Amino acid sequence: MSADRRPPAIALMGPTASGKSAYAIALARRLGGEIVSVDSALVYRGLDIGAAKPTPEERVRVPHHLVDVCDPWQPFSAAEFAQQARAAIDGILARGRLPVLAGGTGLYFRALLDGLSEMPQADPDLRAALAAEAAERGWAALHAQLARVDPEAAARIHSTDAQRIQRALEVYCLSGRPISDWQRNARTARLPLRVLKLVLAPSQRTLLHARIEARFDAMLAAGFLDEVRRLRALPALAAHPDPLALPALRAVGYRQAWEHLDGACSPAEFRARAIAATRQLAKRQYTWLRGELDVRWFDPAGQAAALDAAVDAFLGARR
């Protein structure tokens, strides 16, 4: 059997607050790599503290890609992410460096590694019409409408997930076919790399919960609420009819902070809501990761040496 000569890459997956970013930076520095962020919050400018974005100093030490690529009022799809990430990876390989793919957004990982189904392009007029209907009737009503035409998609899309409800209805209206039908059919090409997929997660869920709480308190101390105040002052967001429907502001912590600054809850209630939302995000990420059959799980705190050995064995055996 001939050797697999595709270039290697390391994919670091895991729930939020599991230590992915720190290990990705250490790994990239040790092996001469560059990081491609696979995170749906890090693509947005201005979402820094609350998204745990790498600091300017960290980005000087190790090049990061797919960070700060669009404004928080702009849509950014998984297809756009995959296209830009693949271009970044091509550049990394051309420089003779190792791509380190790090993040916790499952849809982005699937789009990048496995490709996406071809489907109709976005239609701004139709999107505007769906948004106007949602403003009048609510996204739950549009979710019920989706359930009638595409129960499979509705079953996996939450009734408050405005972006995905809108896209699913848009595809159905444009093509007459459910988005779930499109997703089962022909896909764009898989990423042409040999990828070692590693999940970084604490050995006990209680440890992750403690990390989530401590990290959120550190974000508050670092000025998270001031960051959200600056976002609220941006003209494009201040003028938006429903800013909390934007994907950027649905990121955990940001929605709760926005509502708190609107006077919807006390500081203590805001903190509790944000931490609870982050735990729910981690739960959803665990569900996705358990469905990934070709991954290896490590606790980055207690199994650091084994984690490094797995990376070295993959690169050494497959170069």
Image (spheres, rainbow, N blue to C red):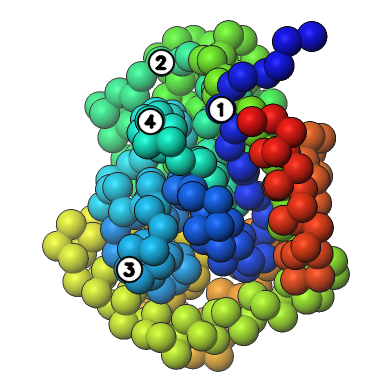
Q: Name the foreground residue: 306 vs 234.
A: 306
Residue designated by label 3? 56
Q: Which mark is residue 105?
A: none
User: Residue, x 40% and y 15% (percent of image)?
Assistant: 120
Q: Is the residue under label 2 in contact with that under label 4 (CB below 8 Å)?
A: no
Give left or right: position of 120 versus 240.
right
Which mark is in front, 4 or 2?
4
Where residue 85 sits in the image (x, y, percent)?
A: 42, 36
User: Residue, x 34% and y 24% (percent of image)?
Assistant: 122
Mark 4 or mark 2, earlier in chain: 4
Mark 4–mark 2 distance (CA, rounded to whole Å): 32 Å
The kind of residue tagged 4 is Ala
Mark 2–mark 1 distance (CA, rounded to whole Å): 32 Å
Residue designated by label 4? 94
Q: Which mark is residue 120?
A: 2
Where residue 79 sits in the image (x, y, percent)?
A: 43, 29
Q: How many marks?
A: 4
